[in-house]
Amino acid sequence: MANEKVTSAQVAALAGVSQSAVSRVFTPGASASRKTAERVRAAAEALGYRPNALARGLITGRTRMIGLIVAYLDNQFYPVALELLSRALQEKGYHILVFMAGNSTEKISEVMGELLDYQVDGIITASVAISNDLTSRCAAAGIPVVMFNRGQDDVRLSEVTSDNVSGGRRAAEFLLQAGHRRIAHVMGWQGSSTGRDRAEGFRQAMDAAGQKPVALIDGMYSRETAAAVTQDLFTGSDPARPDAIFVGNDHMAFAVMDTLRFDLGLTVPGDVSVVGYDDVPLAAWPAYDLTTIRQPVRRMVDATVDALIAQIEGDGVPRKLQIDGPLIIRGSARIG
Amino acid sequence: MANEKVTSAQVAALAGVSQSAVSRVFTPGASASRKTAERVRAAAEALGYRPNALARGLITGRTRMIGLIVAYLDNQFYPVALELLSRALQEKGYHILVFMAGNSTEKISEVMGELLDYQVDGIITASVAISNDLTSRCAAAGIPVVMFNRGQDDVRLSEVTSDNVSGGRRAAEFLLQAGHRRIAHVMGWQGSSTGRDRAEGFRQAMDAAGQKPVALIDGMYSRETAAAVTQDLFTGSDPARPDAIFVGNDHMAFAVMDTLRFDLGLTVPGDVSVVGYDDVPLAAWPAYDLTTIRQPVRRMVDATVDALIAQIEGDGVPRKLQIDGPLIIRGSARIG
DNA sequence: ATGAAAGCGCTAACAA
DNA sequence: TTGTTAGCGCTTTCAT
């Protein structure tokens, strides 16, 4: 049974044409008469022939594979993005090679190297930063890189983010307007552009209102850290305790709410208002009903795919895009 | 700058050796003297050379790529499995080509075809069934397939599941022992082996106890369907209402709990006990605190990878594995 | 241990 | 439109 491999030569033999004729029939935009095409297709069908994508890639220099590097999948934002990215790329005839890289620089460069070995046509990094060195290697290899949901100051890199500074600002303004005066910010990881930008926006709005944050703590985008930090926030004396918390992303916000309700015995938003960032599907579930800044994943994904493909097909230069999302008001925060 | 491509020939020229010598240095288990190896490595380093994985794959017939087909990513079980699978395979030097296929048979076979085009060394299907025809094609191409979390009666296919029948049985027994006598089962999708097996186990235990289920409804593994079904369950007259629900997976169980609490105004487990299946991370969060049958993902992943690699490296035949998991008792169900 | 040569399966000039 | 020819970059005999 192990038919193993059917080659274009075998098809050619059966169809009584040259091997290159077979190739032409399977190459979009190549010329072949109706007659040959039919005979070739029939022979191919009979033999179960399909062109070898590797061999094709070797000669055309295009593999139609895209490398996707993602840190973790436990934050719901990423599976959602991954699913959307994968589908969008599939629709355009591309396939994705996924690598999980955590946040270690080492691992990331190892993984990038492997992607280059496989001659991917482009690389998407989801929320991971990449070194200058790596950027140079990709540039040298002529492989476009687009960073999804992370920014970096390098003209050779495309990036697609939401307007995180303005998002942070709006979150703070919303809380202030509701009358909160003891606001804390459990920040997104300060090693990331998103974490820093959101915190920056938050600071700007607080300054503008002449308010000082009760606390500014790095939650590292980790559920555990966010929970621990929340505990700490409420161990001090009463006046130091926040009555509102802006959290750097939804994933941490869920941990904050869990801690508030189940460990500290507080109510949300009765005792404490909570605002998150991302608007992952879980944020809309009634168990959390989280007020949050939406990142319009779908549009971000489309922009990412467009940017990447434009660069791959030649008529594109790296671009930096910001796609804005609204504040979604739900029940986890008091309303002004 | 666009260095584009560095070939082994260029390295050979610089190192003053033959092209095949370069190949040998980069081929594990090939012979080369220390001296040549050093010169080659130096030259490669200088030029930034790395072997082209495509060309290598073309000749060796091994690409070290594994195709992974997954239906959706919205059930937390899959991102978790995907992350684990990806990491495990990476560790063994394999890379994964991910495809999102929904549950349409058409899409699945389209996607399988593309995987075969890319000459993947093996295929893992996560919770998707595959047609006989497809199985034959893979068998003919000599490409091993292992089904993760789904079973199918075909000797050519490997499968790794948990013991779903016994899991369903234990869930029912647990509920019965707690004194419940009006138990409903919102079943997993009856088009899937897991959905059917869990329901089968549930029935067995109910029969053995001489009990009739209040209801047996297909929740389609969908959050929306599960929510709707739950509403229906409580619109009838009082005696028909369940006091316990065994739900076919956690993903639906969350929807059931949300509906119970926020739409129906019932308490869990006060008014209704809920038991799920999978033990995804979210089940342990205090907002749900879900009693559930654990699927030991890590062990299932390891078994999957082992089975696949054994078959790829030759010394393996398709195997059917069942890996059992415990009932995890939390707060969503009354205790007997 | 090493080089020369063949060829993996395909596409892309080039003639005809 | 078609066949012939030359590679894509690599591994692997086969001699040496």
Image (tube, coloured by chain):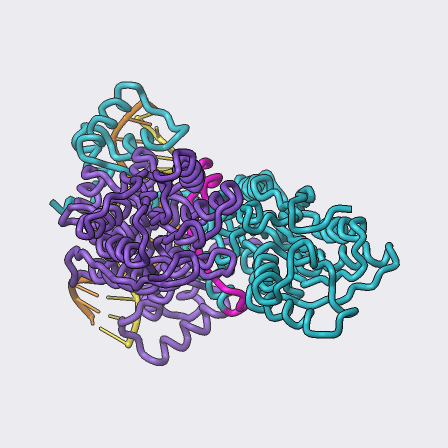
Chain colours: A cyan, B purple, C yellow, D orange
**What's the magenta region?**
A85-106
Can the viewer see residue A260 in this picture? yes
In depth, the one of A115 and A20 nearer the eye is A115
The residue sitting at the left extreme is A1
Q: Is residue A315 left or right of residue B141?
A: right
Quadrant in the rendering for residue B83: bottom left
| Residue in the foreground of this view, choosing between B231 and A199 | B231
Give residue A171's position: percent from left, percent from top.
Answer: 73, 51
For residue A52, say whether it is visible: no
Q: Is residue A159 left or right of residue B38?
A: right
Residue at figure coordinates x 30%, y 49% from the top left: B181
Q: Pick whichever, B319 or B321, lies toward us.
A: B321
Name the residue: 51% across, 69% down. A106
Q: Name the residue: 31% across, 40% down.
A: B215
B231 relative to B26 in the view: left or right:
right
Residue A228, magenta (yes or no)? no
* Nearer to us in this view, B178 or B188: B178
Residue A101 in the magenta stretch? The answer is yes
Task: Quadrant for residue A129, please give it.
Answer: bottom right
Write the residue at 66% across / 67% down.
Answer: A218
Quadrant location, the N terminus of chain A: top left
On the image, the x and y values in percent for residue B327 come to 32, 62
Point out residue A152 in the picture as x, y percentages from the top left corner.
66, 57
Q: On the picture, is A144 further left or further right than B223? A: right
x and y percentages locating residue B220 in the rendered image:
35, 39
